[in-house]
Amino acid sequence: MLHDQAGSLAAAGLALAILFAGLTGLAIQRGSICMVAAVEEFVTKRRLSRLFGLTEAAVWVTGVLAIAMLFGMQLDVEPDFGFSAGILAGGVFLGAGALLNNGCLFGTIAKLGSGNWHYLFTPAGFFLGCMVSPTIAPPPVERAPMQMELISGGVALGVLALFLIIRLIGTWRHRRRGRPEAEGWQESYAALVIGLASGLLLLLAGAWAYSDALTRLASGGGLVRQDVALFAALLVGALAGGGALRPRVRWQARVALGCLVGGALMGFGAAMVPGGNDKLILFGLPLLRPYAWIGIAAMTAAIWVGLLLRAKFSNDSGR
């Protein structure tokens, strides 16, 4: 009897996790969430709305975890890793790969949801990069994680309130300038859904990022039913968001090659950090893991420098 009840609870937990993964994919696609797009928006338009949205998603995850702890829930925290030059280098590889891929791991899901099947080559390349990386660069050294108890519920809720106030001010400014209301709230709605769904997913299924699943597969760990189910739900949610059930982009071998090589660079970097930007933002940042903050900072800087160099060479060739 107890065995049957435990099985029913596990099945219900997996069903909820699948639902939240689908909502995450939907929000990623509808909000056009992507590190490359976020940095490019800042470089070209001097706007921080997408970067702010990514940060806000991490803050919502922190809020979910802090509230869970206030109710006495025990969390299976992620391991921490000591600082090393490899983490910085891994972040740079993540950024370079995302730029070549024209989308980070979030952006890859968004583009697949829009019917751009070139991006099926990105996870394939990511897998290959994860396989190659340990033979060239040693993985970071694991250390005892910082306890989540250091994050108080009051502080987390206070940060959430601050983010909401900033969002309300941003919406008011958009209205004053005569812009559509949806433009000011698009990233906010996406960040809210991604953050809440990912936080609940973390409680139900642990660190579930599809980059994690590919990394485990590349290291010989194999895929489990949960990995496949959650990735499928993430992709179905993105497809629902984009309404794309068939290819909408003309096939170009050059684009597919860029996705494969870009994915490989991201996989190479993810094995060094460790973790792709999906895991770093949704799990590493909320859990206050220093390696995640360093990796994301290095990735952002690499994308920024790459965009500036791309613009410079484009201008020089156009003269």
Image (spheres, helix red, strand yellow):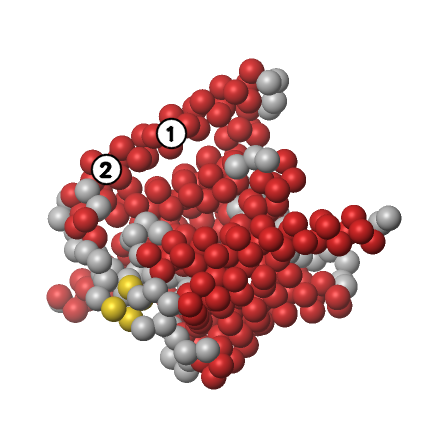
Q: x, y percentage for residue 172?
A: 49, 19
Q: Nearer the viewer, residue 233 or 83?
A: 83
Query: Label 1 crowding class (10 Å Cα cut-off): few <14, some 14-19, many 20+?
Result: some
The quarter of the picture where the N terminus appears is bottom left
**Would you place residue 208 above or below residue 318 in this image?**
below
The residue drawn where x is 32% and y is 35% is: 160
Query: Label 2 crowding class (10 Å Cα cut-off): few <14, some 14-19, many 20+?
Result: few
Q: x, y percentage for residue 223?
A: 41, 74
Q: Nearer the viewer, residue 141 or 61?
A: 141
The residue drawn where x is 16% and y is 43% is: 70
Task: Tell me which corner region of the image, top left, top right, bottom left or bottom right, holds residue 95.
Answer: bottom right
Residue at the farthest right position: 319
Question: What's the amino acid at mark 1?
Answer: Leu
Q: x, y percentage for residue 128?
A: 54, 77
Instruction: Calculate the distance from the C-alpha at mark 2 to the C-alpha at mark 1.
Output: 14 Å
Camera sees residue 222: no
Lateral position of residue 4 relative to residue 231, left or right: left
**Residue on which the image places disc 1:** 164
Q: Find numbered disc 1 in the image and state the secondary structure of the residue it sits on.
A: helix
**Residue on which the image places disc 2:** 155
Count of marks overlaid on the render: 2
Lateral position of residue 256 relative to residue 214, left or right: right
**Would you place residue 63 above or below residue 93 in this image?**
above
First in residue order: circle 2 vs circle 1: 2
